[in-house]
Image (cartoon, rainbow, N blue to C red):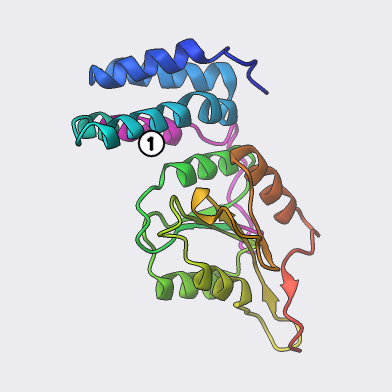
Amino acid sequence: PEVPPGDARGERRGLGRAAVRLDSPAMDALLDAAIARHGLVAAWEEVMAPVLHAVGRTWETSGDEYVEVEHLLSWHVSTALRRVGAPEPAGPFPADAPHVLLACVPNEQHTLPLEALTTGLAELRLPARMFGAAVPPEALDRAVRRTGPAAVVLWAQTRSTAHHPLARHVADASWGVRGARARTTVLLAGPGWAGRTPDPGMLRPGGLREALALLGDLCAPGSGEHRNDGRG
């Protein structure tokens, strides 16, 4: 659900104050309450992400004075996201079920947005493999070719970490038997990719909500988004 403008202002203020106080129990309670009240997507977009950005800006302008605040808040956000899972266990996914591979580009350490996306995929019962921070290009290439994902999400926080040749390489990677080889769709996630039109075979979601919608379509049975590479 959408959060009415200003409706989460008090929750953001409370979470920010708890973070500055280094009050772990209060942060846990506030984060769980925000998720329960608004749902994962709205809680991320309206509460967690804005407070993380605000704390990060404060740290950058204060000569590292608030680095402990950012670290502790990040840890509690990550923990809160991991407490959210699929609503009802429905057994293991089929081995050939379309899945999503999530990774930060090399030199990128910001994983929380991908953690939020991984949690959202779990709520939608979409299988995902989360590889975390600063994945080396060779490791990413091997993972893509070994698992054949329906989509690969690459996170870049800044333009200095956005790795366009790597994204192009992943979009061009193919697997499968001759005559039926397939490729993946790459989602360029994060502000680092801004300012450039995505190449063919790539999409750039505007946020968590849009990313989940795109991935839901890409992983839907019979979606046809495992594109034939045309090489015979």
Quadrant location of the C terminus in the rendered image: bottom right
Residue placed under numbered mark 1 in the picture: 78
Give the residue at x 30% y 16%.
18
Residue 210 or residue 191, whichever sits in front: 191
Give the residue at x 58% y 24%.
39
Vertical placement of 111 versus 196: above or below?
above
Q: Position of residue 188 (x, y in %)?
A: 57, 57
Q: Position of residue 203 (x, y in %)?
A: 66, 57
Quarter of the rendering containing residue 227: bottom right
Secondary structure under the numbered disc 1 in the rendered image: helix
Give the residue at x 46% y 28%.
50
Q: Position of residue 64 (x, y in %)?
A: 20, 36
Quadrant location of the N terminus in the rendered image: top right
Q: Is residue 87 magenta?
A: yes
Vertical placement of 66 versus 5: above or below?
below
Give the residue at x 38% y 48%.
110
Residue 109 or residue 102, whichever sits in front: 109
Report the magenta residues as a range: 72-99
Vertical placement of 193 versus 118: above or below?
below
Q: Position of residue 26 (x, y in %)?
A: 32, 15
